[in-house]
Amino acid sequence: MKLGAPDARPGDSPQRIGVLISGRGSTLAAILAARQAGRLPAPVVLVIANVPEAPGLEHARAHGVPTAVVDHRASASRDEHDRALAAHLRGAGVSVVCLAGYLRLLSPAFIREFAGRILNIHPSLLPSFPGLHAQRQALERGVRVTGCTIHVVDEGLDSGPILLQAAVPVEAGDDEERLAARILAAEHQLYPEALRLFCAGRFEIAGGVARVVPESVRR
Ligand code: GRF
C-alpha cells in the first residue's frame, strides 16, 4: 500500500505522527498549529480517539487530518482494544505516537510494538508527582515550582526517559484549576518543541536518560 502524506513539505523528516486523544484536544490543537506554522518537520497523519464524541476530533478535521475512533467500550479487553489501535496506526504508517490527553493506560504489547516511539506529556516535573492529579499533588506537597514533562513511554507509570521539561512557579492563592491552566499553557509550547526535536533525531537515549544532541553532531 502506498501511504499518502497530504501535507508533506520540503525538509520534512521521514517521521509520520499519530496522535491519541480522549477529550477536548487542546494539546492536539497546539501540535497542529505548530505544523501549520512550519515548526514541526513531520506531518500528523492520523488522530485516533477512544471516545466517539471527543471534541478534539474537530481540530483534526479542521486541518484535514484523517481521524479514527477506536471505542474502548467495544473491546472485551485492553489488549484487544490496543491491537485495534495498533492496526490503525500501522495502516497509516505512523512512526511516532503522541499521547495528548489520552486517558487510558496502554497494554505492554502496544508499548513493545512502538517501543521508544511513544511520547507522553505529564503535568509535573517528573519524577515528582506521577499518576493522576499531578497538579493537586504538587499543591498538597507545597512545592514552589512545578511544571510539565515530555517523556518517552515505557511500561512503568510516567517513568520513561525525560525529553524536555518546563518549570511553572506555584503562585500564592493558586488552586488546582489556576495552576493547571498555567501548566497547560506551558504544555502547549513544550509538546511541539519536543516533537520537533524528536522527529529531527535530536534525542540520544542511553541507560534510560535522554540528551539533546547539537544539530551539528547529529548522526
Ligand atoms: C493536560 O492536563 C495534560 O497534561 C493531560 O491532558 C490534559 C490536556 O488535555 N495529559 P487535552 O489535550 O486538552 O485533551
Image: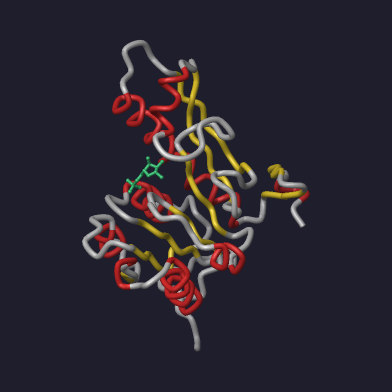
**Residue at left offset 67%, top offset 49%:** 203
Residue ranking furthest to the front: 76
**Residue at left offset 41%, top offset 69%:** 77
Q: Position of residue 34 (x, y in %)?
A: 42, 50
Residue ranking furthest to the bottom: 1
Residue ranking furthest to the top: 172
- Viewer-closest of 98 and 11: 98
> Is 211 drawn above or below residue 46 in the view shown?
above
> Is 52 drawn above or below residue 2 in the view shown?
above
Q: Position of residue 147 (x, y in %)?
A: 48, 29
**Residue at left offset 71%, top offset 42%:** 211
Q: Position of residue 5 (x, y in %)?
A: 45, 73
Does residue 116 appear left or right of residue 97 in this picture?
right
| Colour theme | secondary structure
Quadrant of the rendered structure where residue 61 is?
A: bottom left
Does residue 179 appear left or right of residue 207 in this picture?
left
> Is 178 drawn above or below residue 32 in the view shown?
above
Residue 67 visible from this viewpoint? no
Residue 57 visible from this viewpoint? yes
Q: Quadrant of the C terminus?
A: bottom right
- Viewer-closest of 80 and 150: 80
- Viewer-closest of 124 and 141: 141
